Image (cartoon, rainbow, N blue to C red):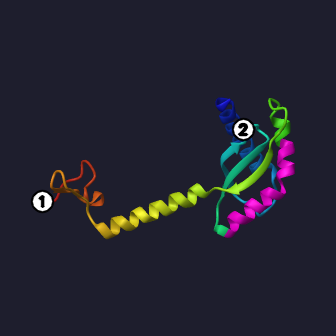
Amino acid sequence: MARRKERVNELIRDILSELIRLEVKDPRVGLVSVTDVEVAQDLSVAKVFISAIGDETAQKEAVQALQQAKGFLRSLLSQRIRQLRHTPELIFREDPSLKTGARVFELLEQVKREEGPFTDPAAGTQNPDPEAIPPSGAPVAE
C-alpha cells in the first residue's frame, strides 16, 4: 500500500502542477510550483504543498486563490486520473520546508562569518578559505 500511496502522491503532484499552470487564471496565483503532495492513508484527502514566487503576502494569496479553486481543480483532476474511484479532497498549504532551508542556510553563513576559517583539530592544520584557492590550472602566486 505504501508504494501505491507514493505513486498517487507523484501522479497528483505532476497533474496539479500542469493544471495550475495551464487552467488557473487567477492573477493571485502567479508562478506557483507544487513541491509535494501527501495523500491520506485512505486516499480521501490530499495535502498539496506549494511554493509561490514573491514575498510572504504573495505566498498566502496564492494559497488562498488555490483553496478557492480547489473544486475546479478537483474536477479536472478526476477527469485525468481514471485509476482512482474517488478523487481526494484537495487542501492547499504553503510549503514550510523552503523557509526552513533558507533559515538553515542563513544560520550556516552566519556561523561561517563569525568563526572564520575552519581548523582541523585532529591534523592541527587550518582549512583555507575555499574562495582563496585558485582554480585548477591557474598560476599560484608565491
Q: Report whether residue 9 is seen.
A: yes
Q: Position of residue 102 (x, y in %)?
A: 51, 61
Q: Quadrant of residue 127?
A: bottom left
Q: Which residues are magenta?
A: 57-76
Instruction: Tell me the chief SS of the magenta region.
Output: helix
> The N terminus appears in which quarter of the rendering?
top right
Is residue 99 shown above or below 83? below
76 with respect to 117 (left or right):
right
Q: Position of residue 49 (x, y in %)?
A: 68, 52
Q: Which mark is residue 41?
A: 2
Is residue 87 shown above or below 26? above
The residue that appears at 34% across and 68% down in the rendered structure is 113
Residue to which mark 1 is pinned: 142
- Whether residues under marks 2 and 1 lie with C-beta atoms below 8 angstroms apart, the answer is no
61 or 28, which is in the foreground?
A: 61
Mark 1 secondary-structure assignment: loop
67 or 17, which is in the foreground?
A: 67
The residue that appears at 56% across and 61% down in the rendered structure is 99
The residue that appears at 76% across and 52% down in the rendered structure is 91
Please name the amino acid that badge 1 sits on. Answer: Glu
100 or 116, which is in the foreground?
A: 100
The crowding category of the residue bearing disc 2, from other C-alpha atoms within 10 Å (few below 14, some 14 to 19, many at least 20), is few
Single out the residue that lies furthest toward the left: 142
